Amino acid sequence: MAELPLKDPAPADDAADTEPRPGRIRKPVGWSMIFIAVLVAVCVVLVWRRDGVHGVTEILFSDLELFGGILPRVLAGCLLGAFIAEILPHEKVSRALGPNSGLKGLLIGTAFGAILPGGPFTAYPVAAALLTVGADFGATIAMVVSWTLIGYGRAIAWELPIMGIDFTLWRIAISLPIPILAGALGRFVYVRMYPKVEPPS
Amino acid sequence: MNAALIIDITLWGSVAVLGFMVWQRGRVVATAAAREGTMDFINIVPRVALGVIGSGYIAAVLPQEVITGWFGADSGWLGVLMAAVAGAATPGGPVIGFSLGAVAMKAGAGSPQVIAYVTAWALFAFQRLILWEIPFMPERFVWFRAAVSLPFPFLAAAIAMAIGKP
């Protein structure tokens, strides 16, 4: 582990005051993109054979509308991630959310994920920002899982109207412990998979 | 779409507040951070376009009855397993995931199975993983998180079975 990749979340407490924050590595178009593109292409053909050109354009226009609506939020999410990475002091984050932050770190991650506004366009850039400024996998997992399971944004916008209030509240109550457990499990496994982390204090 | 408006306001409000905090640290820092965020945005737009526009077609092709028929009220743990797999395989945005859950419930699926379905879908819907999580996050983190999350749809179903639906 001599040369850590930039995106490695291992905290560098001794190098907390490095001047420019390491930029995230941009990935070129990868296999995942190609896979999805092929899948979409196949589905377009299937829709076309079933419903004709009309079916294809109908879906296209409604999805384009959706896309136009989402774009500004994606921009907001990216800016949010960049600002958070700029503001949060590295050493404070590694203390509050780093590998040695214990249950408190997992709780902070969970609370943060639950109150984070927006959709995937905010959650993932912000989570990536947390990793770059010193949060460990455990706390970041707690945050991502908390956002996806108990975040209010999706629950209010989609789950309440579609599933009803009873089901939504019941499901969220059941989900409450999961982010903490997932974060704890993640930390437990991570330390054993990559044992070159500082011993717990 | 009141909820959407509230989300937009909190979202841009947070951007404004944080932007102001960054700006207080100096113009150069603020410009650099804003440029970083904008570059992220530009890089991500093609993926988002593919995901949002493509998911409509994937959903249109998906045989919904097949997915929801797998997990009836007395399907037990096998039903939970099928529901978890179906949740991970469900493409598309929140509308599709929750709608299928609602359809399944109306069609007589058990609550623990629907919980497992919604939880699995929230944790690892493959399309969200591939189109949102991997582009933004280190790939190693994404797979690690998904692996660590594996037990939890089943835990949620177990809790649901234990406490029952009110």
Image (cartoon, coloured by chain):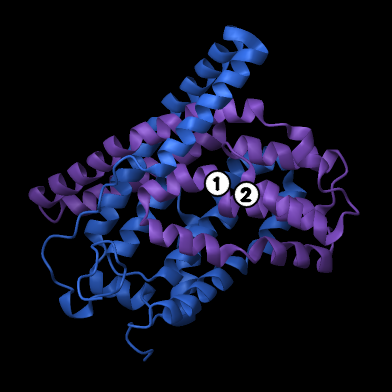
Chain colours: A blue, B purple
Asked if badges 2 and 1 are on one and the same chain, I answer: yes
Give the percent coordinates (x, y) of residue A19: 10, 64
Q: Residues within 10 Å of mark 1 (few under 14, many from 20)?
A: many
Instruction: Find residue A171 and name its label.
Output: none
Residue at numbered disc 1:
B126
Q: Nearer the viewer, residue A117 or A133?
A: A133
The image position of residue A113, as x and y in percent, is 48, 59
Q: Would residue A59 be found to the left or right of residue B166 on screen? A: left
The three-letter amino acid code for the residue at tag 1 is Phe
Q: For the residues marked 2 and 1, what is the alpha-carbon distance in whole angstroms?
A: 6 Å
Residue for point 36% across, 91% down:
A201
In primary-sequence order, the first of circles 2 and 1 is 2
Towards the viewer: A108 or B130 = B130
Q: Mark 2, chain letter?
A: B
Q: Nearer the viewer, residue B123 or B12?
A: B123
Helix, strand or loop at mark 1: helix
Is B106 rendered above or below residue A69? below
Which residue was labeled with disc 2?
B88
Name which residue lies at 41% across and 29% down: B49
Amino acid at pointer 2: Ala
Q: How many marks?
A: 2
> Where, by quadrant of the figure, is residue A46 drawn?
top right
Residue B108 in sight in this render: yes
Point 34% across, 33% down: residue: B45
x then y, percent, for residue A2: 20, 76
Is there CB contact under 8 Å for labels 2 and 1? yes
Q: Is residue B122 above or below residue A5?
A: above
